[in-house]
Amino acid sequence: MPIALGLVGVGKIARDQHLPAIARGEAFDLIAMASRDAAGLSDVRFTSLKQMLDATPILAAISLASPPVGRAELAREALLAGKHIMLEKPPCATLGEVRGLEDLAKEKSLTLFATWHSREAAGVEAARAWLADKHIQSGAIAWCEDVRVWHPGQDWIFAPGGLGVFDPGINALSILTAILPGNVSVLEAELETPENRQAPIRARVTMLHQGDARIAAEFDFLYKGDPHWSIDVVTAEGALRMDQGGARLCIDGKEVESGDSQEYDRLYVRFAQLIQSRRSDVDVRPLALVADALLVGTRRTVDAFYF
Amino acid sequence: MPIALGLVGVGKIARDQHLPAIARGEAFDLIAMASRDAAGLSDVRFTSLKQMLDATPILAAISLASPPVGRAELAREALLAGKHIMLEKPPCATLGEVRGLEDLAKEKSLTLFATWHSREAAGVEAARAWLADKHIQSGAIAWCEDVRVWHPGQDWIFAPGGLGVFDPGINALSILTAILPGNVSVLEAELETPENRQAPIRARVTMLHQGDARIAAEFDFLYKGDPHWSIDVVTAEGALRMDQGGARLCIDGKEVESGDSQEYDRLYVRFAQLIQSRRSDVDVRPLALVADALLVGTRRTVDAFYF
């Protein structure tokens, strides 16, 4: 029997990804949706999680696709109401919020699933398996896109807690931490923030794998060409390249067949499995790397940005 | 038999606290010291950890009191050489660095002790015990001092990774996370950074205990009066106040006798105990709270600061 699901936050990512994936899958039955801006939406009945929970006690699980700032409070409310929780990425605005939710989910024996959709991209598992026994020598990330095309009008992304260019960039970090066998840490960072915004629009971050191999990452929200989302890893035994955000994998220049990506389909399958087995899946490392870049980053103010 | 100890970083905190505490205690025998600026110091023989390790193979443990940026690399080098490690606070410049050291110490069966000296202040244990079963309603932190008096000429404190006013402020956060029974997270923050510096000189941080009780923290590096380092916690069953950086504890206005603080004496006793029992003690929560304040903080540029 499908699990009764409620969705909170019906913005771009919900319409583009969550709704089609839920509809295609068989694990969940989408019973209700809530959105702060529900006024103009014929398919959204509730303007708050509270309304939805009060009116729809049958719900067993809640998927939160609202922006990260404020998501912890919603997740807490839903956990206290006894619901299993799936969180869009990044799981919360802060590491402390994630920790609090983990504690609460454990206390209540509920599932908390902090998703990283890019980890479900087609090439990731094969990349992880290939790198598992390799000696990593260096790496590079280029995550470049035009924010006006990919996040049109999404002002929250540049507000405090919105992460700026790290909102897409954290996808790269979620893949990096999934495929590399050892620990990744930030050595230094340069952050460019528009004078009228709070979050960076460009960032260069130097990371270390196992304290020695350098990984140079470039995150650019002002990139005008075709977007590219690529990760290179050089090892003593050959080189790996992922592009198309992790969907395409090449090893020593030769493409590895990986099938389709179906990122969100896989996330909902996994959420159902976690609920069945009453487990949680929470990995804060990608968010911690962003926090670390802010801790040690050198800041520079750049030209104002307007959508 | 005392444990053969090497000390790296012989600056203000080493001279004021580490050296006297090591000399008073019986657990360690200080065999060697290394400092980048050893040239003018008659008691420091080495200018690098590497020199010290090569010339003094007898060392079993290393205490790192150099600034946080670069400390992870030193700790890694010492762990790879088979030494137990004690880290000044904050343990590293980033959370990822701490995680990497934890992994390495575990792999090598060595002790890693990330110290928080303020947690050893005289009133902390009694405060923790009293709060353990209380319902927390609210809290307040005021950590106000004149950086020119307490950190004269220490430019590194305002450099990237130096934490600025959070360098002392993290002491308050280390006490807060030790005495409160539940999870602490950052809700919002305001950060004031001098136009010629990279780290904040003043910060206001609103935190939540268990997602509901508000804790308002004020960190001020430009405070001209007598410094005050105080924490208030209001509970349904009475109010607690710590001041003098945790040395003095009052419950409902009545002072609780707590003895002397001897923070660093206790740290070295604990380090010896951890080495004996081959355990580590690493709690990143205070550093994660600072990182979280940077993740969600609203930044404002203020007047240039010169020592």
Image (cartoon, coloured by chain):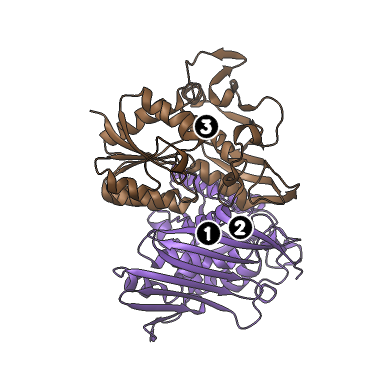
Chain colours: A brown, B purple
Q: Quadrant of the N terminus of chain A?
A: top left
Residue B79 in sight = no
Query: Where is mark 1, residue-wise?
Result: B188
- Tell which subunit mark 1 falls on: B
Q: Judge left or right: residue A50 versus residue A137.
A: left
Tag of residue A175: 3
Circle 3: element type? helix
Residue B25's spot in the image, x, y percent?
Answer: 48, 71
Looking at the picture, does residue A34 appear above or below residue A243? below
B287 up-or-down from A15: above or below: below
Residue type of the residue flagged with mark 3: Ile
Q: Nearer the viewer, residue B220 or A44?
A: A44
**What residue is shown with label 2?**
B298
- In this image, A104 relative to B14: left or right? left
Q: Quadrant of the C terminus of chain A?
A: top right
Query: Label 1 sits on what residue type?
Result: Glu
Alpha-carbon span between mark 1 and mark 3: 29 Å
Above or below residue B289? Residue B148 is: below
10 Å neighbourhood of mark 2: few (<14), some, or many (≥20)? many
Residue A280 location, quadrant = top left
